[in-house]
Amino acid sequence: MNTSRRSFLKSLSLISAAPFILPSHIWSAATKPNDAITVGFIGMGKQSKGLLNAFLNHRVCRVLAVCDVDTTRRTAAQQRVNEFYTARPDRGTPDCSAYNDFREIIARDDIDAVCIATPDHWHAIAVIAALQTGKDVYCEKPLTHNIHEAIAIMDAVKANNRILQTGSMQRSMKEFRVACELVQNNAIGRIDRVECSFGPPGIPCDLPEEEMEPGLDWDLWLGPAPLRPYSSVLSPRGIHDHFPDWRNYREYGGGMVTDWGAHHLDIAQWGLNMDHSGPMEIHPPEDVEAKNGAILEYENDIQVIHGAGFGVHFFGEDGEVKVNRGKIEFWRDGEKLAGFVSREDGGSLGSVLSQIEQEFLSDAKIRLYESPDHIRNFLDCVLSRAKPVTDEVIGGRSAICCHLMNQAYYNHAVIKWEPEAMRFAPGSGNPAWLTREFRAPWSV
């Protein structure tokens, strides 16, 4: 962005601390390529396919570069970008660069923002490097691989005065916002517990060695993780249409606790108004072999329980609110007042959400951040310098909830936590549980 535009954006940041939504006529207007938010993509697997399409279809941005350690994936992404701009010359030029090493994107002064969709063990390193070179960041969830990295990213965003959006896009889905507004406005009374449904914690990686075809920089894929032989389970070669299982292994992810848990525990945090706080105690299940049953305990004895059920299920003294993608139910005193789970219920999700807003939230004192579109919200905030719906604190603290729960499983220990300070209470926990060993030369 040129100097005059940066000065304009800086002036906007001084007068706008609230969520900023650009008028629709600006979004629909033709944007000159030189005025667009320029974006580079790091990690071009399955998740990034949807992200790339979403960014391309917003006129306010222009994709300049893609990066992946797999030759086939990065070449295919580069071709997709160039074909897009070839068909739409008013939106940009078909000269997208393709890199093997993310540091080449980070080093470009003409890139304003990056979208990071690598495996979790790479998130913090790429995010912090981008922030330190003055770039805004969209990073997939969970924001980090461990607690230390979450705190480091929060500090880096503040130190570099940048915008960060975590890819916890459920906050940009109306059913989740409406559910949390019901809970926060006391529609079901005092909350007793929240049950969140997702899969098991991570496991150590013990995959057998496989022969690797040329075209993958395996050493760079591993990066800060321990050196080990290649496995197609971790990084399937070329173009694939599934989410690889690296996320199941502790060296690279945190199992479903950090995968789906990063979505549903985030909504639990939102409904409980704990975005800037967190649990005070974490309890493992009684059975050391159990894969669910861990509990995050908050102030006022509210429990968030890892179980199996609806998705996110709030239990209050007067009723219940259940929510999942495309589904919601609102119960009070044993009666279902509104709900949509399937077409058999009649109506539609949209009509049920409108009913809830009109009948039960029309005079609500608490209104939560309304984001019509997760990518658009990020781009709006890059322009306005306002905080996005899942900023670094929200994304970081939701990730910390996941990591604390995993540590309770991994170590079968009760953990006492000081959420404001983001540290173990005296006499509890182990400093090693906050971080990991980084393979040189990588570190956070």
Image: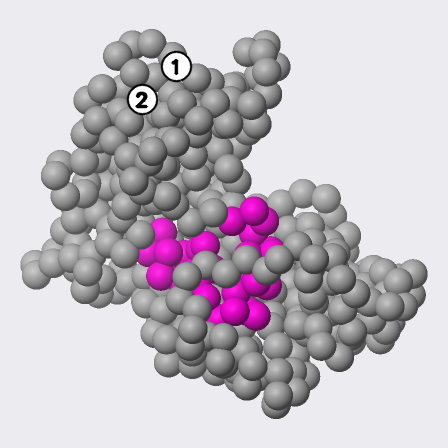
| Magenta stretch, main secondary structure class | helix
Give the residue at x 50% y 27%: 354
Task: Quarter of the image for the N terminus: give it.
Answer: bottom right
Residue at image mark 2: 320
Question: Where does the image place residue 73, in percent across and percent down from the top left?
Answer: 76, 60
Point 70% across, 73% down: residue: 36
Q: Are marks 2 and 1 in contact (CB under 8 Å)?
A: no
How far from the left and from the top, in percent, is residue 386?
46, 66
The earlier-in-sequence mark between 2 and 1 is: 2
Q: Which residue is mark 1?
A: 337
Quadrant position of residue 379: bottom right
Residue 254 part of the magenta segment: no
Where does the magenta region start and end?
371-398
Q: Secondary structure at mark 2?
A: strand
Residue at point 46% right, 18% down? 339
Label tally = 2
The image quarter containing residue 331 is top left
